[in-house]
Image (tube, rainbow, N blue to C red):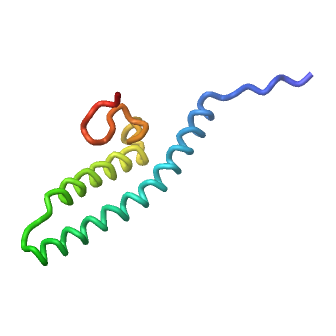
């Protein structure tokens, strides 16, 4: 009689990590597009008004931080997943 298939915990963990890595690669593409949109907007705002837009500067900093967190996760520098799966929401406040 064949032995029942058992789940290899390391393989299950690896598969789970792969799913999250693919998810965050897709998110990274969208976030990078938004980041560059903020960069272009900020440049145009500065060119036409002579001043930077503080809201765009904060948005750019938040997006850059989020990109950094994703890259840390993807490169195995940390096991902490970025927003929306992190303990912190990516904007400095603890999750409720």
- Residue 35, percent across and down? 31, 62
Measured from the top left, where is residue 77 in percent x and y? 37, 41
Residue 61 horizontal/vertical position (percent): 22, 53
Query: In which image quadrant can residue 27 be found?
Result: bottom left
Residue lying at 11% horizontally and 65% vertically, measured from the top left: 52
Position of the C terminus by quadrant = top left
37 is higher (above) or lower (below) than 48: above
Q: Which residue is drawn at 24% across and 57% down?
A: 60
Q: In this view, does 59 lie to the left or right of 78?
A: left
Q: Nearer the viewer, residue 56 or 79?
A: 56
Question: In the figure, is residue 42 to the left or right of 73?
Answer: left
Image coordinates for residue 89, horizontal then vertical, percent? 33, 38
In percent of the image, x 26 and y 65: which residue is there?
38
Is residue 61 or residue 2 the one in the foreground? 61
Direction bottom: furthest residue = 48
> Image quadrant for the N terminus?
top right
Q: Quadrant of residue 86?
A: top left
């Amino acid at each position: 009689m064949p032995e029942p298939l058992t789940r290899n915990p390391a393989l299950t963990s690896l598969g789970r990590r792969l799913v999250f890595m693919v998810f965050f690669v897709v998110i990274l593409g969208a976030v990078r597009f938004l980041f560059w949109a903020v960069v272009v907007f900020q440049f145009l705002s500065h060119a036409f008004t002579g001043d930077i837009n503080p809201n765009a500067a904060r948005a750019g900093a938040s997006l850059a931080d989020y990109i950094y967190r994703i890259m840390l996760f993807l490169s195995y520098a940390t096991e902490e997943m970025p927003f929306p799966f992190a303990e912190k929401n990516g904007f400095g406040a603890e999750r409720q």
